[in-house]
Image: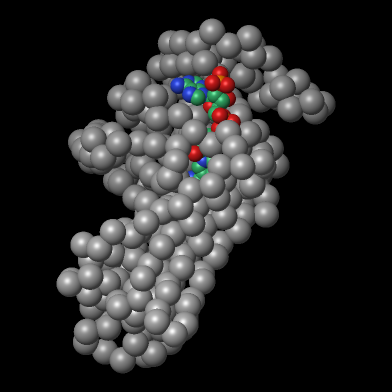
Amino acid sequence: MKVALIGLGTTGRIAAEYFHKEQALALVLCRENSQDAGKDLGELLHRPHMGVSVETTENLEEKLNRYKPDILIDFSSPSFLREHLATLARCKVNVVTAVTGYTQMDIKRVKVLARKREIGVVIAPNITLGVNVLLVMAQIAAALQSDYDFQVVDENHRNKKDSPSGTAEKIVAAIKRGLEKSEADNLIPIHSIRAGDITGRHKVLACGKYDQIEITHTAFSRTAYAEGAYKAAQFIYGRKGFYEMKDVYGLGKPNYAEDRLHTDATASLAGFYA
Ligand SMILES: NC(=O)c1ccc[n+]([C@@H]2O[C@H](COP(=O)([O-])OP(=O)(O)OC[C@H]3O[C@@H](n4cnc5c(N)ncnc54)[C@H](OP(=O)(O)O)[C@@H]3O)[C@@H](O)[C@H]2O)c1
């Protein structure tokens, strides 16, 4: 598996090291006018020579044809895929995008392009296994406690550009999937905190009249994001179509709201952990 990476910022740097350690990194891309172009990745990461070239996105098609990556890992911003997805599709390069802040229209376009041009794309605004398990747990809590008040707290570092986070929005969607129909239109507030160097913490509060449940995921290190991107890359290697991280982690199938209506909830939980 040969990988190209775009976005050598706070998270992309960690991902670059991770993919290099796994001997999968063939190319790092940077902006057209970037002074990093032509350097070795080691120079940018203050490491010895790593043997990985840094190239600009200018004439991207020619560079993709030259380095022949199987997959592009994206830790940049929504503008990169908006501009270059068609080129990636032409060159048959699959994509894992961890970027957040895409519009519904962006996602629709990615889905259509992945299908029509027969490439594989993973859209992963929530890339860690832990957050994906939290999504399942939030849906279960909502299915079992529809009359509780649900709220979401989203804590991230002060430089995070989007607020609320894509993960917080996914959590709200998971809660709504779990709630009974009569409750599903209720507003589920998201409280966003942007401060210091918080790596990432998401909390679901389910408050009843007499008790409260909290489900929290805390990322201790950005390596969690790099590891998730690596798992997504292994998944999409040689595949076609549009996927999310729940597909990567095999959490896509169960519908806990239906389970609540038709089966004993304990049995469905036991089934999930079996
Ligand atoms: N899915 C997850 O679980 C997860 C986890 C962590 C981060 N993320 C997402 O990953 C993205 C990056 O996060 P970060 O904290 O690493 O941000 P960051 O520190 O701001 O880094 C972004 C990097 O991407 C580059 N970039 C942005 N747009 C580009 C473009 N169109 N072409 C080429 N390079 C471009 C930037 O270059 P310049 O400095 O030249 O602008 C910078 O090097 C964000 O969308 C963030 O929300 C997702």
Eyeballing the image, is 196 above or below 149? above
Residue 84: quadrant of the picture = top left
Residue 268 visible to an observer of this rendering: yes
| Residue 116 or residue 243, whichever sits in front | 243
| Residue 4 or residue 157, whichever sits in front | 157
| Residue 58 or residue 259, whichever sits in front | 259
Q: Residue at x 70, y 19 (%)?
A: 40
Q: Position of residue 25 (x, y in %)?
A: 61, 34
Eyeballing the image, is 265 above or below 21? below
Numbered disc total: 0
Q: Position of residue 55 (x, y in %)?
A: 57, 16
Q: How is the image coloured?
A: one colour
Q: Residue at x 50, y 11 (%)?
A: 32
Q: Is residue 109 left or right of residue 81?
A: left
Residue that lies at the very extreme toward the left in this rendered image: 182
Q: Is residue 223 left or right of residue 110?
A: right
Residue that lies at the very extreme toward the front in this rendered image: 209
Q: Position of residue 165 (x, y in %)?
A: 45, 45
Q: Is residue 105 left or right of residue 59?
A: left
Residue 230 visible to an observer of this rendering: no
Q: Position of residue 160 (x, y in %)?
A: 54, 36
Residue 188: quadrant of the picture = bottom left
Residue 130: quadrant of the picture = bottom right
Q: Residue at x 34, y 81 (%)?
A: 144
Q: Residue at x 22, y 84 (%)?
A: 261
